[in-house]
Amino acid sequence: MDPREEHARLLDDLSRRGFLQRAGTLGLGGIVLAAVPAAERLIAATNAEALVPLVSDSALQAFADTMIPGRKTSRTDLGNAVQAGAIAGVDKRPGAVEADALALYRHPLIGFNALEPAFLADLNARSLQQGGTFVSLSFAKRVEVCKGALAFSNPDRLVWEAAAAVPFTAFCAAALIPEQTAKKASGYRVMGLPGAAPHGYRRFSYRKKLSKERTRRGWLK
Amino acid sequence: MSPTRVDVLIAGTGFGGSISAYRLAELYKAAGVDPRNIVVLERGRRHKHTDFKQSMHVENLSEIYELIQGQGAQVVVARGVGGGSALYLAASIRAPHETFERRDHKPDDGPDRRIWPHQISRRSLNRWYRRAERGLRVNRPSWKQVSKSGGLWAANLAELGHTCDRVPLAINPKRCQNVKWCHTGCIFGAKNTVFTNYLASAERLGVRVMPNIQVESVRPSSARPYRYIVDASTMDNEGPNPSRQSNGSVQFECKVLILACGAMGTPPILMRSQNSLPGLSSHVGRHLGVNGDHIAAIEYDPKRVERVLGLKNYKDFHKGKPITTMTYDFWVGRRSHRYDGTRFNLQEIFLSSLTNFLYDDGRAPFGDPSWWGLQKKDAIAHWANRIELLAMVEDTHDGTFYATPPTGGGAQRANAGPLAVGLFNYTLSEQSIRVREAANAAMKKIASHKRLGKFMKLTETPGAYASHPLGGCRMAESVDLGVTDHSGAVFGHEGLYCIDSSIIPTSLGVNPSLTISAVSERCASILVHRGKELGLPALPEQYKARRPREIVGERRKP
């Protein structure tokens, strides 16, 4: 599609559906807002609002656990509740759910609520093809659902990429942890990243020449 | 509303705006005129070093960054006084000779020619590079100051017979605490941002810096000696819950207008002003580039590193400076024009922990997911064994603003968050793809030598990720090829200048801040010398361009 038409359509979609008002704030990479037109397509195709599961918290947590799987736990880093059955428990280390992916989905600066109805409807529809709601599926079947949805052949892949970006941001950036240290952020602990270092580091170098240099000053002529 | 009258209005406080402000302030002082008639506007708020946080918290990122999603590219820009200099990683390298001689370009981009104006070459820029290096206090770290991640990259290269240089940095080695948190602003005041040198010195001389004002459009003034009326918005950036949206409007009238809002900011201002500025080049908003940025990572095997490279204590890659080493081996020896568009340089870099999302390590069995799921979790758990690489390749400038950006900045914003949708498209040309593939192949060969490590390429999501946007108002020989001449003067509009990254016409092969600074020093000097023609003070005999003072300000002392 011609970019101008695509843009006109984007603005039209945003205005018509009132997504901007509902979104509050959008903050997670361009990916969330860029996915809005695809979300619109999904809504049109599935009458999504009627299908949004009442158990959206557990579905979002189960999806986050499929993206970055973790150990079973009842509380997140910030002390929030983990929904029953959301974590499959296929990994012994903390995962995205423990790193508060759900709270990040709901954070006003992220604006995922603009995409949530469409995403959950598609998640639900694809899960039913595997035999049940997403939360009720085994981890292997959850993976199958996500493989299909995140395939390049899926024209609505952007919505799923946006949904996937949230748990990664929660886990790898500790995006909601006020004091960003490994002690507080389980994602940092798994990565081996200490986090904030207000006192600095002294030992950080091998302290020896490790390669022949090409230039005398550090730039080419 | 009657406009505020000033001699010189500068929009933007990044490298270009700050250097221009300081050099003009020197002129005014030397001529005995009060530099208060030079005003610098900044759309963001002012931060002290102690306002910055070592944090990727979403609210902190919203405060200092803007992430602009175009069609086919995601571009990171800074918001706040100091512009990109507040958040850059301070690598300060002169672009090689070949960069300025390039003749390659996209097939639909005019005749075969040298892309840069003939006045600009590496040789002609050397004196301006020297001046910018002095202003920004660029120094080259010793090997004892090279981080372990940079050292490992150097040792890996040496094992294959390659060379690897230490990267000159605009970082004060005494104040630096080696924590790799440059990307959210340095709390120690160690990074030489423009608000520790050029801009701070300009203010000390009397220049007025006005944060929270965003320039929207420009139109001619008929009240000579004033030439331009500038419409601007006041921005709600302060307080506990800023909307970061416009909450009022202001006007300025000036003799000389310098647009220095960068590649994502300056082109939209001129595009919105096209009806008022007849004869503006049709190239406004075109030829956006990403400096050939292409990132990847290597996950090393600690045992192999110790056995093959003899490096013990393999850890602590989160410590040190974010950029310290770089190889030029894939550039040198390719001097003739037949190599244009094929060269690249490879630099070790620390971007942030969030970039985990971008790498596809390919460790999963064929058909299984490798950028999410259990395999990806394993890759993340090995993050501490990983270094990141930035290839800076000779690509073409593949982006175009496809519609006139709305007021309130160059992009659509829904709220106070860091996300905006940019009205530009970015489709990598064949050359841009080919040279990135060549860089991938080179990095993979280096990483997998003697099974030292595993190459992790960028996830195959289409598009470019860029923190070095360039172009949109490129300099050229004539109005039918670009927007400004070699001095940043907009063709056909006396007293209107673009002095920032938007006039850089090609990717550079190195991190761009020093070249933007050198070009800005050159443009500012030409402007200072012709000030009298434009209604500014005449250049007195005793005028001498001096090194800006270092004014660090309040900072955290460990």
Image (spheres, coloured by chain):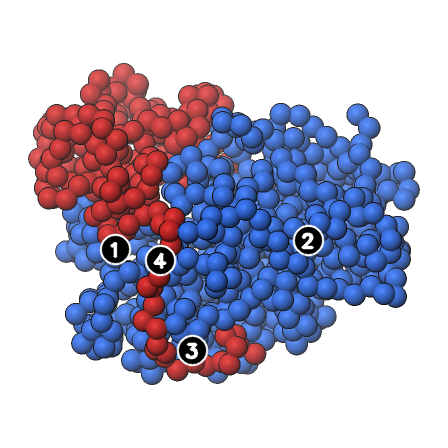
Chain colours: A red, B blue
Instruction: Assess disc 4: are there few (<14), some (14-19) or many (≥20) residues with their C-alpha within 10 Å of its C-alpha.
Output: some
Q: Which residue is mark 3?
A: B329
Q: Amino acid at mark 4?
A: Tyr
Q: Is the same chain shared between marks 4 and 3?
A: no
Q: Is residue B313 above or below residue A137?
A: below
Q: In what element is the residue under mark 1?
A: helix
The residue lying at 44 percent from left, 28 percent from top is A25
Residue B95, located in which quarter of the rendered image? Answer: bottom right
Q: In what element is the residue under mark 4?
A: loop
Q: Is residue B110 above or below residue B74?
A: below
Q: Chain of mark 3?
A: B
Q: Which residue is mark 2?
A: B201
Numbered circle sitting on residue B383: 1
- Residue lying at the far right of the rendered structure: B224
Q: Quadrant of the C terminus of chain A?
A: bottom right
- Picture coordinates of residue B207, whole percent (x, y): 74, 46
